[in-house]
Image (cartoon, grey):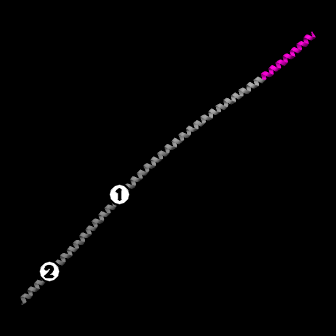
Amino acid sequence: RDRQTGRDKQTDRRRHTEWDRQAQRDRETDRQAETNRQTGADIQNGTDRHRQRERHRETDRQADTDRSAQIHTQTDRHRQTDQQTDRQTDRQTDMQKATNREAEASTERQALTDKHAQIGRLKEKDTGRDRESQRRRVSEREKDRERERERERER
């Protein structure tokens, strides 16, 4: 009986040792599985983070493209507005120049008209002087003739 009990104890010890080893192997397997699971999660998280970074980069790229297009559009609008303003300013300048030329031409025409009038008055004066001087000459001649007749009579 003691032998049987001893064998039983020895068998129990072996069993416990085997159980302990099995439990140790199970714990090691569990630890390895947890490590693998954690590594897999880390890998998955890394992949997810990588994808998320790529999405952010793409979103940023799209935003940059949109901003560039918006700036380009604004620049085009400003350029068009500037060109319109320049054309309008040029038209106004041209109209002002034309108005100035017309005013200058009108002033020149008026000056010519005034000059012609002055010339006409001077000619009239000359003509008047000429007539007056001609009248005097005629009058002188008549007086000379009259004197001549008087002398003729006296003789």
Asked if residue 24 lies in the magenta stretch, the reply is yes
Please state, as top left, top right, bottom left or bottom right, where the N terminus lies in the image: top right
Label 1 vs 2, first from the N-terminus: 1
Measuring from the top left, give residue 43's x and y in whole percent.
68, 30
**Circle 1 is placed at which residue position?**
99
Number of numbered discs overlaid on the protein picture: 2
Q: Work out which residue is located at the far top of the displayed protein and give it.
A: 1
Question: Tag 2: Cα neighbours inside 10 Å, few (<14), some, or many (≥20)?
Answer: few
The magenta span reads: 1-27
Q: Which residue is at 23% across, 72% downward?
A: 123
Depth order, front residue of 42/125: 42
**Circle 2 is placed at which residue position?**
139
Q: Which residue is at 52% across, 44% downward?
A: 71
Measuring from the top left, give residue 27's x and y in whole percent.
78, 23
Question: Tag 1: Cα neighbours inside 10 Å, few (<14), some, or many (≥20)?
Answer: few
Asked if residue 9 lies in the magenta stretch, the reply is yes
Kind of residue sitting beneath label 1: Thr
Element at label 1? helix
In-image side of 93 versus 71 (left or right): left
Kind of residue sitting beneath label 2: Ser
In-image side of 140 versus 84 (left or right): left
Measuring from the top left, give residue 155's x and y in whole percent.
6, 90
Question: Do the residues under discs 1 and 2 have CB atoms within 8 angstroms?
Answer: no
